[in-house]
Image: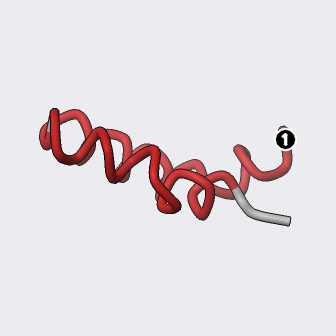
């Protein structure tokens, strides 16, 4: 079972990174800070 950030890393965040690098940076920072809460809430 993938964690949320692993799922993002699999392609979703990669696609965003190509289009909107600043947004991707924000997403990565948010995921890194809230990783455990996101995984628990899934």
Q: Determine which residue is flagged by label 1.
A: 42
Q: Residue at x 62, y 55 (%)?
A: 7
**Vertical comparison of 41 with 10: above or below:** above
In the picture, measured across the screen, residue 15 lies left or right of residue 21, that is right
**Residue depicted at x 37% and y 41%:** 27
How many C-alpha atoms fall within 10 Å of the one at disc 1: few (<14), some, or many (≥20)? few
Task: Judge from the rendering whether residue 11 lies leftward or rightward of residue 23; answer left or right.
Answer: right
On-image quarter of the C terminus: top right
Q: Position of residue 10 (x, y in %)?
A: 52, 61
Image coordinates of residue 31 in percent, x first then y, are 50, 50
Q: Quadrant of the N terminus?
A: bottom right
Say if 15 sits above or below 11 in the image: above
Q: Residue at x 39, y 47 (%)?
A: 13
User: Seen in the image, is 15 located left or right of residue 23?
Assistant: right
Counting labels gives 1
Looking at the image, which is closer to me, 29 or 23?
23
Which residue occupies the foreground of this view, 4 or 11? Answer: 11
Which image quadrant for residue 21?
top left
């Amino acid at each position: 079972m993938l964690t949320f950030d692993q799922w993002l890393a699999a392609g979703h965040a990669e696609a965003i990174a190509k289009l909107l690098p600043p947004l991707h940076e924000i997403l990565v920072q948010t995921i890194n800070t809230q990783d455990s809460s996101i995984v628990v809430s899934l």
